[in-house]
Image: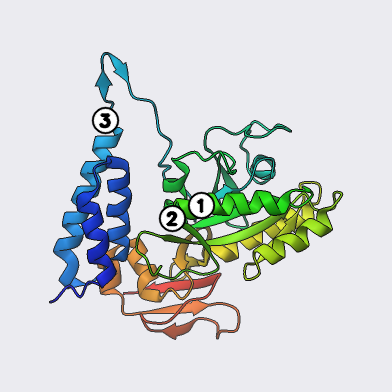
Amino acid sequence: MPANLPPQYYELEREFKREQDPKEKLRLAQELLAMMPKHKGTDKLQAELKAKISKLRQQLETPQKKHGARTVETHDHIDKEGAGQVIMIGPPNSGKSSILATLTHAHPLIGDYPFSTREPLTGMMSFETIQIQLIDTPSISADFYEGYVTNLIRAADLVLFVADISSPEIAEEVRAAREQLAAHRIHLATRSAPAPDPRISQKVTLVVGHKAFEDNSDRGLEILKTIFPEHPILATSILDDDSMECLRRGIFQALGIIRVYTKRVGHEADFNDPIILPTGGTVEEAAMTLHKDFAHKLQFARVWGKGKFEGQRVSKSYQLSDEDIIEFHL
């Protein structure tokens, strides 16, 4: 069976072969794997690429000694936890650390001065029955950008761009941050789609106008809307519980995922550990998260949910909705 690889794959593969920096080589290998069509014709290629990724990771994680000294940790990879990984970026003093402290149990250093965050910090945000991982990162300005942030952005499921809408310089601050991101081949997108240039990473982005209700915030919000005319924008304040709750839900919706609860025949549904699927996920894909053999043996399923017949019988290809309850039958 032919691999049927897109032209962009071969262009990115040539760049991968030329690259000498192990960190950049790892990033390119991960992008190649994500771009590769998943079917029997690419099984061997997938296995070879996964082996290269594993070798590169091992190389980067193994302490290297030079004249008796150990290399410094780079922070450019954070293991994903929960239902999704969300990275917060933005200009100095935008309030990212305050948002992290409000939405999670993390305790970042919060200061009224630029660049108080120097290393990435994670926290788990609760949303109803799931946990979502948030990552706070150093600020981005015209003359400051931590190089490792690029890999963190590329690996994340969602970007949260946070701007201080009370700042008189909001336009200049936001544009400087976007220019830095563009220089590092990061494009803040409204939806997931392949980039025309495989070297550019298009990241689905939710824009947050933070510090609402403060002086100049109405003006700043309007400016932010002109800079991001196509993006969803949420106005937030850590002093307003409703706006922070809207942010929780906005993050969940922007991730493009659904929660599916399972039940055994003759038992109640289990609402503690839902299956997480992309929007449009099917019964078969839900079964695959449990075990591929389970999915292979699956005959049909019964589904309960909003706007459905209670316990209606469905096939493997049936598309599930958020908060559906599914009962598998082998």
Quadrant of the drawing holding the C terminus = bottom left
Which residue corresponds to the image point at 59% horizontal and 49% vertical from the top-left? 177
The residue tagged 3 is: 62
Q: Are marks 2 and 1 in contact (CB under 8 Å)?
A: no
- Residue 112 screen position, x and y as percent: 74, 33
- Tell me which amino acid carries mark 3: Thr
Q: Secondary structure at mark 2?
A: loop
Label 1 Cα crowd, 10 Å radius (few <14 / some 14-19 / many 20+): some
- Residue 313 screen position, x and y as percent: 44, 85
Marks 1 and 3, how far apart at CA = 29 Å
- Tell me which amino acid carries mark 2: Arg
Q: Earlier in the sequence, mark 2 or mark 3?
A: 3
Q: Does residue 52 appear to the left or right of 183 in the view shown? A: left
Which residue corresponds to the image point at 77% horizontal and 63% vertical from the top-left? 222
Q: Tell me the mark number nearer the camera, choosing from 2 and 3.
A: 2
Q: Earlier in the sequence, mark 1 or mark 3?
A: 3
The residue tagged 1 is: 181
Pick the front one: 8 or 239: 8
Q: Does residue 159 appear to the left or right of 165 in the view shown? A: left
- Tell me which amino acid carries mark 1: Leu
- Residue 250 screen position, x and y as percent: 64, 62
Which numbered circle lies on residue 185?
A: 2
Asked if 13 appears above or below 21 in the picture, the reply is below
The answer to whether residue 174 is seen in the rendering is yes
